[in-house]
Amino acid sequence: MHPIAAGKESLGMTSVTIAAAPPVAAPEKPRYDPRTRALIEGSITATLVRLAAPNMLVMLAQTSVGLVETYFVGKLGTEALAGVALVFPLLMLMQMMSAGAMGGGISSAIARALGGGRRDDADALALHALAIAIVFGLAFTAALLIGGQALYRAMGGSGASLDAALTYSAVVFSGAILVWLFNSLANVIRGTGNMAVPALITVIGVVVLIPLSPCLIFGLGPLPRFGVAGGAVAVLIYYAVGSVALAAYLRSQKSVVRLAFTGIRFRWALFHDILRVGAVAALITVQTNLTIAIATGLVGAFGPAAIAGFGTGARLEYLLIPLVFGLGGPLVAMVGTNIGAKRPDRALRVAWIGAAIAAGLCELIGLAAAAFPHAWLSLFSNDPDMIDAGTRYLHVVGPAYGLFGLGMALYFASQGAGRLLWPFLANFARLLIAAAGGYLALRFSGNLTAVFIALALALATFGLINAAAVAGGAWFKGNAVQR
């Protein structure tokens, strides 16, 4: 008899046998694909740089598409070039919304599902992303086919330039679904941490598009001369073939996420997972373009040369966005995957390292532009008034580019975390400061440099609010993952 039991009997106590509770099994850890595991366990800086390189190549290739097309359309005359220029801002808006805004929502949802070990949800999200792409593509088609003429007239189009704009717009926006499908499929793949496949397909497409565009614009052999519409047809062919290639990869065994067209039931929860990030990001994209439009209107009070100088200087700012997007895609994937894997501290480290890299690169560019503005401005014109306005812009706003890069990188990281309230508020603050501050500077000083100071403060505010929000734990309040 056990000594304790014997003691109990000697004291007249009844022995009670308590059965030991069975050991609680530890929850099974998700089985990660090697690519997903690298996002969760690999070196942060090395992984970011490795993933960013092909992504930056994508942005360079897609930027070259517009430049090549503009070059060849310019051979048709000033009216054709002006017509395409009227359509270009709307095409860029659609591109930014489908690739960076809603695309970021898609990548974020995929990454968080994979990080949480929800492979079935990740597969289903691919089909949900396509459904969203079709709806938004049809919305752009309807809006521009119905309201395009009134819009282009309001933007200053008339005569031959308006005719060219309507021709180009009718073709390119009739195929808006193709642009949305291409960017949505690419972002499904990027959400798995694979930046190479979208980059490869994009670069191959650009190599084919460069000779195809002039053949369709001017006609060659059996190909008819389409004129300004030929550039739009070439672009749509590029997006159509690219979409097929991306879909084929997602249907193959090599893809981490498998695209299936049968056996998937549409669920509002999965639509919500994409839209709660993508829809807010789309509003931020609209805010960004509205800020530039308002700033252009304020500068316009100083005459055409000031507009040209500001526009040329601000074009450098636009080039920073593709640069930061090169880091933004990996940031969405890495932050989202780590949030899904319940590793919020690592997600924060990813965000800050990416933000530091982006801020450093953008600040170097801004300081170089401020120190040597003529090197950039003279690429476009040697008009002394234009050079003077552009120089003043770069002297004032260039040094704020680092904070702009900081804010943009944290915006992409916040997409990955699925928390976009503060980036939205930060961009809204930028809009208010640029508009109200620029107006007050114009009214009370009448000085162009004062307007540029307001624009610089707006950029700095955008970056600082995003940084303060992330540092203050905005990602982990409410129903977010707890640290």
Image (spheres, grey):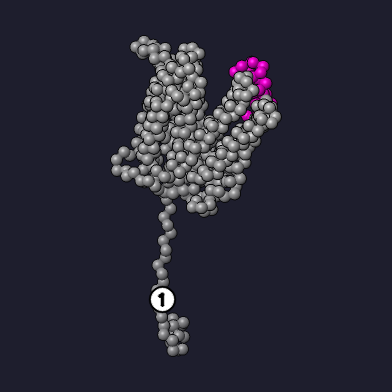
**Main SS of residues in magenta:** helix
Q: Position of residue 475 (x, y in %)?
A: 53, 48
Does residue 42 show up magenta in the picture? Answer: no
How many numbered circles are shown?
1
Residue at horizontal 29 percent and vertical 40 percent from the top: 262
Mark 1 packing: few (<14 Cα in 10 Å), some, or many (20+)? few
Residue carrying label 1: 18
On screen, residue 36 above or below 436: below
Looking at numbered disc 1 in the image, what kind of residue is underneath it? Ile
Q: Position of residue 53 (x, y in %)?
A: 52, 32
Q: Position of residue 155 (x, y in %)?
A: 50, 23
Q: Secondary structure at mark 1?
A: loop
Q: Which residues are magenta?
A: 364-391
Residue 102 falls in image quadrant: top left
On screen, residue 137 above or below 21: above
Q: Residue furthest top?
A: 221
Residue at horizontal 39 percent and vertical 22 percent from the top: 171
On screen, residue 192 above or below 151: below
Residue 296 falls in image quadrant: top right
Residue at horizontal 43 percent and vertical 45 percent from the top: 273
Quadrant placement of the N terminus = bottom left
Residue at horizontal 54 percent and vertical 32 percent from the top: 290
Q: Is residue 50 visible?
A: no
In depth, the one of 143 and 203 nearer the eye is 143
Q: Is residue 16 visible?
A: yes
Q: Position of residue 242 (x, y in %)?
A: 39, 28
Q: Residue furthest front?
A: 443
Residue 9 falls in image quadrant: bottom left
Does residue 389 show up magenta in the picture? Answer: yes
